[in-house]
Protein backbone atom coordinates (compact mmCIF):
# COMPACT_ATOMS: atom_id res chain seq x y z
CA UNK A 1 0.00 0.00 0.00
CA UNK A 2 1.28 3.44 -0.88
CA UNK A 3 0.32 5.77 1.95
CA UNK A 4 1.69 8.97 0.48
CA UNK A 5 -0.92 11.75 0.65
CA UNK A 6 -2.53 12.64 -2.66
CA UNK A 7 -4.83 15.26 -4.12
CA UNK A 8 -5.17 17.36 -7.21
CA UNK A 9 -7.54 20.33 -6.91
CA UNK A 10 -7.06 23.24 -7.54
CA UNK A 11 -5.37 22.74 -10.89
CA UNK A 12 -2.71 25.41 -10.37
CA UNK A 13 -1.20 23.29 -7.61
CA UNK A 14 -0.78 20.12 -9.68
CA UNK A 15 2.92 20.66 -10.40
CA UNK A 16 3.78 21.01 -6.73
CA UNK A 17 1.75 17.95 -5.81
CA UNK A 18 3.29 15.88 -8.59
CA UNK A 19 6.73 16.59 -7.18
CA UNK A 20 5.57 15.65 -3.69
CA UNK A 21 4.15 12.32 -4.80
CA UNK A 22 6.68 11.20 -7.37
CA UNK A 23 9.85 12.50 -5.67
CA UNK A 24 9.26 12.01 -1.94
CA UNK A 25 12.96 11.82 -1.11
CA UNK A 26 14.18 14.54 -3.49
CA UNK A 27 14.89 18.22 -3.19
CA UNK A 28 12.82 20.58 -5.33
CA UNK A 29 14.36 23.99 -6.04
CA UNK A 30 16.33 23.63 -2.82
CA UNK A 31 13.27 22.74 -0.75
CA UNK A 32 12.15 19.29 0.46
CA UNK A 33 9.37 17.79 -1.68
CA UNK A 34 7.50 17.02 1.54
CA UNK A 35 7.72 17.88 5.21
CA UNK A 36 7.31 15.35 7.98
CA UNK A 37 4.91 16.67 10.58
CA UNK A 38 6.39 17.39 14.00
CA UNK A 39 5.99 15.44 17.20
CA UNK A 40 3.13 15.47 17.94
CA UNK A 41 1.32 14.04 16.06
CA UNK A 42 4.30 11.91 14.95
CA UNK A 43 6.53 9.92 17.27
CA UNK A 44 10.03 8.99 16.04
CA UNK A 45 9.79 5.44 17.39
CA UNK A 46 6.25 4.67 16.21
CA UNK A 47 4.42 4.30 12.92
CA UNK A 48 1.62 6.63 11.87
CA UNK A 49 -0.10 6.29 8.51
CA UNK A 50 -3.27 6.58 6.46
CA UNK A 51 -4.40 10.02 7.65
CA UNK A 52 -7.89 11.41 7.08
CA UNK A 53 -7.84 15.17 7.56
CA UNK A 54 -10.87 17.39 8.12
CA UNK A 55 -11.90 19.99 5.55
CA UNK A 56 -10.68 22.80 7.83
CA UNK A 57 -7.35 21.06 8.45
CA UNK A 58 -7.78 21.14 12.23
CA UNK A 59 -8.58 17.47 12.96
CA UNK A 60 -6.74 14.40 11.74
CA UNK A 61 -7.52 10.71 12.11
CA UNK A 62 -4.82 8.16 11.44
CA UNK A 63 -3.70 4.62 12.16
CA UNK A 64 -0.84 4.02 14.58
CA UNK A 65 0.85 1.08 16.26
CA UNK A 66 1.22 3.06 19.50
CA UNK A 67 -0.73 0.30 21.25
CA UNK A 68 -0.22 -2.79 23.34
CA UNK A 69 0.96 -5.52 21.03
CA UNK A 70 1.57 -2.97 18.24
CA UNK A 71 -1.91 -3.64 16.86
CA UNK A 72 -2.93 -0.77 14.54
CA UNK A 73 -5.61 1.42 16.09
CA UNK A 74 -7.35 4.66 15.16
CA UNK A 75 -5.95 7.83 16.74
CA UNK A 76 -7.06 11.47 16.65
CA UNK A 77 -5.16 14.73 16.96
CA UNK A 78 -6.47 18.28 16.85
CA UNK A 79 -4.72 21.53 16.02
CA UNK A 80 -4.80 24.56 18.33
CA UNK A 81 -2.98 27.85 17.68
CA UNK A 82 -1.25 26.21 14.74
CA UNK A 83 0.17 23.26 16.71
CA UNK A 84 -0.97 19.65 16.79
CA UNK A 85 -1.90 18.24 20.20
CA UNK A 86 -0.77 14.86 21.51
CA UNK A 87 -2.70 12.12 19.69
CA UNK A 88 -5.26 10.12 21.61
CA UNK A 89 -6.40 6.61 20.88
CA UNK A 90 -10.10 6.66 20.12
CA UNK A 91 -12.37 4.73 22.50
CA UNK A 92 -13.00 1.02 22.03
CA UNK A 93 -16.39 1.73 20.48
CA UNK A 94 -14.60 3.21 17.48
CA UNK A 95 -11.62 0.83 17.65
CA UNK A 96 -13.37 -2.51 17.74
CA UNK A 97 -11.69 -5.68 16.48
CA UNK A 98 -14.82 -6.12 14.35
CA UNK A 99 -14.04 -2.98 12.30
CA UNK A 100 -12.90 -2.90 8.69
CA UNK A 101 -9.59 -1.20 9.46
CA UNK A 102 -9.41 1.10 6.43
CA UNK A 103 -13.05 2.21 6.37
CA UNK A 104 -12.98 5.27 8.67
CA UNK A 105 -13.77 8.91 7.91
CA UNK A 106 -14.90 12.23 9.39
CA UNK A 107 -18.06 14.27 8.94
CA UNK A 108 -17.66 17.69 7.28
CA UNK A 109 -17.77 19.45 10.66
CA UNK A 110 -15.33 16.90 12.16
CA UNK A 111 -17.76 16.13 14.98
CA UNK A 112 -18.61 12.59 13.87
CA UNK A 113 -16.30 9.66 13.18
CA UNK A 114 -17.63 7.01 10.80
CA UNK A 115 -16.39 3.44 11.00
CA UNK A 116 -17.38 0.19 9.32
CA UNK A 117 -18.07 -2.73 11.64
CA UNK A 118 -19.43 -6.28 11.66
CA UNK A 119 -20.44 -6.04 15.32
CA UNK A 120 -23.68 -7.80 16.36
CA UNK A 121 -26.83 -6.09 15.15
CA UNK A 122 -25.68 -5.13 11.67
CA UNK A 123 -28.04 -5.39 8.71
CA UNK A 124 -25.54 -7.48 6.79
CA UNK A 125 -21.81 -8.08 7.00
CA UNK A 126 -20.16 -4.71 7.72
CA UNK A 127 -22.32 -1.63 8.35
CA UNK A 128 -21.39 2.05 8.69
CA UNK A 129 -21.77 3.52 12.19
CA UNK A 130 -21.43 7.13 13.31
CA UNK A 131 -19.85 8.13 16.65
CA UNK A 132 -20.16 11.62 18.06
CA UNK A 133 -17.00 13.29 19.31
CA UNK A 134 -15.57 13.80 21.88
CA UNK A 135 -17.23 10.81 23.58
CA UNK A 136 -17.80 7.96 21.14
CA UNK A 137 -17.51 5.15 23.65
CA UNK A 138 -20.98 3.78 22.99
CA UNK A 139 -22.12 1.46 20.22
CA UNK A 140 -22.50 4.23 17.68
CA UNK A 141 -25.49 4.94 15.45
CA UNK A 142 -26.14 2.61 12.55
CA UNK A 143 -26.80 4.74 9.45
CA UNK A 144 -29.79 2.56 8.67
CA UNK A 145 -31.27 0.72 5.71
CA UNK A 146 -30.96 3.64 3.31
CA UNK A 147 -27.18 3.23 3.53
CA UNK A 148 -26.46 -0.21 4.96
CA UNK A 149 -27.63 -3.45 3.36
CA UNK A 150 -27.20 -7.22 3.43
CA UNK A 151 -23.77 -6.65 1.86
CA UNK A 152 -20.82 -4.66 3.29
CA UNK A 153 -20.57 -0.85 3.49
CA UNK A 154 -17.63 1.38 4.43
CA UNK A 155 -15.78 4.64 3.79
CA UNK A 156 -18.61 7.13 3.80
CA UNK A 157 -17.76 10.71 2.81
CA UNK A 158 -20.18 13.63 2.98
CA UNK A 159 -20.22 16.85 1.01
CA UNK A 160 -19.53 20.08 2.94
CA UNK A 161 -23.24 21.04 2.91
CA UNK A 162 -24.07 17.73 4.62
CA UNK A 163 -26.71 16.77 2.07
CA UNK A 164 -24.98 14.14 -0.08
CA UNK A 165 -23.01 11.09 0.97
CA UNK A 166 -20.83 8.67 -0.99
CA UNK A 167 -19.68 5.28 0.26
CA UNK A 168 -18.65 1.88 -1.02
CA UNK A 169 -20.71 -1.30 -0.98
CA UNK A 170 -18.74 -4.52 -1.37
CA UNK A 171 -19.65 -8.14 -1.95
CA UNK A 172 -16.73 -9.25 0.24
CA UNK A 173 -15.04 -7.64 3.24
CA UNK A 174 -13.03 -8.60 6.31
CA UNK A 175 -10.99 -6.58 8.78
CA UNK A 176 -8.20 -5.93 6.25
CA UNK A 177 -9.49 -6.50 2.70
CA UNK A 178 -12.50 -5.65 0.55
CA UNK A 179 -13.39 -6.70 -3.01
CA UNK A 180 -16.12 -6.51 -5.66
CA UNK A 181 -17.02 -2.99 -4.53
CA UNK A 182 -19.03 -0.22 -6.14
CA UNK A 183 -19.57 3.38 -5.10
CA UNK A 184 -23.01 4.39 -3.89
CA UNK A 185 -24.61 7.75 -3.19
CA UNK A 186 -27.52 9.01 -1.13
CA UNK A 187 -29.04 12.42 -0.48
CA UNK A 188 -30.68 13.77 2.64
CA UNK A 189 -34.36 14.71 2.63
CA UNK A 190 -36.13 16.14 5.68
CA UNK A 191 -33.16 15.13 7.81
CA UNK A 192 -33.10 11.49 6.66
CA UNK A 193 -31.00 9.68 4.08
CA UNK A 194 -32.86 8.52 0.97
CA UNK A 195 -32.33 4.96 -0.35
CA UNK A 196 -28.87 4.79 -1.90
CA UNK A 197 -28.20 4.26 -5.58
CA UNK A 198 -25.12 3.26 -7.57
CA UNK A 199 -23.02 5.76 -9.43
CA UNK A 200 -22.84 5.21 -13.21
CA UNK A 201 -21.16 2.18 -14.76
CA UNK A 202 -18.37 4.43 -16.04
CA UNK A 203 -17.31 4.79 -12.39
CA UNK A 204 -18.39 1.37 -11.13
CA UNK A 205 -16.35 -0.76 -13.51
CA UNK A 206 -16.01 -3.81 -11.29
CA UNK A 207 -14.20 -2.86 -8.10
CA UNK A 208 -14.38 0.85 -7.25
CA UNK A 209 -13.38 1.71 -3.69
CA UNK A 210 -12.60 4.39 -1.10
CA UNK A 211 -14.49 7.41 -2.46
CA UNK A 212 -13.34 10.88 -1.46
CA UNK A 213 -15.33 14.00 -2.28
CA UNK A 214 -13.43 17.27 -2.45
CA UNK A 215 -14.61 20.53 -0.91
CA UNK A 216 -16.30 21.68 -4.13
CA UNK A 217 -18.82 18.86 -3.62
CA UNK A 218 -18.47 17.79 -7.26
CA UNK A 219 -15.01 16.26 -7.61
CA UNK A 220 -14.86 12.56 -6.74
CA UNK A 221 -11.63 10.64 -6.24
CA UNK A 222 -11.70 6.86 -5.91
CA UNK A 223 -9.54 3.77 -6.25
CA UNK A 224 -10.00 0.84 -8.60
CA UNK A 225 -8.05 -2.19 -9.78
CA UNK A 226 -10.29 -2.66 -12.83
CA UNK A 227 -10.15 0.72 -14.58
CA UNK A 228 -7.74 1.53 -17.38
CA UNK A 229 -5.16 2.87 -17.80
CA UNK A 230 -3.52 1.28 -14.78
CA UNK A 231 0.06 1.22 -13.56
CA UNK A 232 -0.58 -1.87 -11.46
CA UNK A 233 -2.61 -2.85 -8.41
CA UNK A 234 -5.29 -0.34 -7.49
CA UNK A 235 -4.91 3.15 -8.91
CA UNK A 236 -6.55 6.52 -8.27
CA UNK A 237 -9.11 8.07 -10.62
CA UNK A 238 -11.11 11.29 -10.76
CA UNK A 239 -14.61 12.04 -12.01
CA UNK A 240 -16.42 15.38 -11.94
CA UNK A 241 -20.17 15.89 -11.62
CA UNK A 242 -21.63 18.41 -14.06
CA UNK A 243 -25.14 19.36 -15.12
CA UNK A 244 -25.06 16.51 -17.63
CA UNK A 245 -23.86 13.90 -15.13
CA UNK A 246 -20.54 12.37 -14.08
CA UNK A 247 -17.58 12.67 -16.41
CA UNK A 248 -15.65 9.61 -17.52
CA UNK A 249 -13.00 8.82 -14.88
CA UNK A 250 -9.47 10.03 -15.55
CA UNK A 251 -6.47 8.18 -14.15
CA UNK A 252 -4.33 10.31 -11.86
CA UNK A 253 -1.20 9.09 -13.60
CA UNK A 254 1.08 11.50 -11.76
CA UNK A 255 -0.04 9.95 -8.46
CA UNK A 256 -0.36 6.29 -9.39
CA UNK A 257 2.46 3.80 -8.87
CA UNK A 258 3.02 0.10 -9.51
CA UNK A 259 1.86 -0.55 -5.95
CA UNK A 260 -1.68 -0.22 -4.57
CA UNK A 261 -2.75 3.43 -4.46
CA UNK A 262 -6.05 3.84 -2.70
CA UNK A 263 -6.37 6.61 -0.10
CA UNK A 264 -6.49 10.39 -0.49
CA UNK A 265 -6.72 13.17 2.06
CA UNK A 266 -6.96 16.91 1.45
CA UNK A 267 -8.31 19.93 3.27
CA UNK A 268 -10.65 22.40 1.62
CA UNK A 269 -7.98 24.99 0.84
CA UNK A 270 -6.23 22.55 -1.47
CA UNK A 271 -2.88 23.92 -0.29
CA UNK A 272 -1.58 20.74 1.31
CA UNK A 273 -1.67 17.08 0.47
CA UNK A 274 -1.54 15.06 3.68
CA UNK A 275 -0.25 11.53 3.81
CA UNK A 276 2.63 9.47 5.15
CA UNK A 277 6.19 8.77 4.07
CA UNK A 278 8.74 6.19 5.13
CA UNK A 279 11.22 8.25 7.12
CA UNK A 280 14.06 6.42 8.81
CA UNK A 281 12.28 3.06 8.53
CA UNK A 282 9.06 4.34 10.12
CA UNK A 283 5.86 5.61 8.55
CA UNK A 284 5.42 9.25 9.53
CA UNK A 285 2.63 11.71 8.76
CA UNK A 286 3.69 14.35 6.24
CA UNK A 287 2.34 17.06 3.98
CA UNK A 288 3.49 19.31 1.17
CA UNK A 289 5.56 22.39 2.13
Image: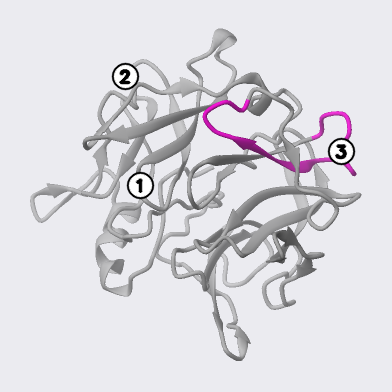
- Residue marked by disc 1: 57
Residue 24, position as x, y percentages in the image: 30, 46
Q: CA distance from mark 3 to mark 1?
A: 32 Å
Alpha-carbon neighbours of circle 2 within 10 Å: few (<14), some, or many (≥20)? some
Q: Is 27 included in the stretch rendered in magenta?
A: no
* Range drawn in magenta: 118-136
Left or right: 131, with 77 as reference point? right
Residue 181, position as x, y percentages in the image: 76, 57
- Residue marked by disc 2: 44
Q: Residue furthest top?
A: 68
Q: CA distance from mark 2 to mark 1?
A: 22 Å
User: Which of 98 and 176 lies nearest the eye of the viewer?
Assistant: 98
Which secondary structure dominates the residues rendered in magenta?
Answer: loop
Residue 232 visible to an observer of this rendering: no
Viewer-nearest of discs 2 and 3: 3
Depicted 121 relative to depicted 165: above or below: above
Query: Which residue does the image show at 36% across and 51% down from the upper left?
Result: 56
Task: Give the mark, 2 or 1, whose residue is nearer the N terminus.
Answer: 2
Left or right: 26, with 153 as reference point? left
Q: Residue furthest bottom?
A: 244
Alpha-carbon neighbours of circle 1 within 10 Å: few (<14), some, or many (≥20)? some
Q: Is 129 included in the stretch rendered in magenta?
A: yes
- Residue marked by disc 3: 122
Query: Which residue does the image show at 33% across and 61% down from the upper left?
Result: 270
Residue 172 visible to an observer of this rendering: yes
* Secondary structure of residue under mark 1: loop
Res 90 label? none
Residue 245, position as x, y percentages in the image: 63, 85
Amino acid sequence: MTYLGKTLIPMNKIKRLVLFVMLPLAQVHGQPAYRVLPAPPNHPMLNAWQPYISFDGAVILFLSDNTEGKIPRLFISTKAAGDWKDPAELPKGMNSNTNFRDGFSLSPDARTVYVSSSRPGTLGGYDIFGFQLPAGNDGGINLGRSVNSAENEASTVITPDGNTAYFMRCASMNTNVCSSCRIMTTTKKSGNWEPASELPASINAGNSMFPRILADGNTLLFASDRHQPSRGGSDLYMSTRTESGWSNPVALEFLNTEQDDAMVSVQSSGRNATGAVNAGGRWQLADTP
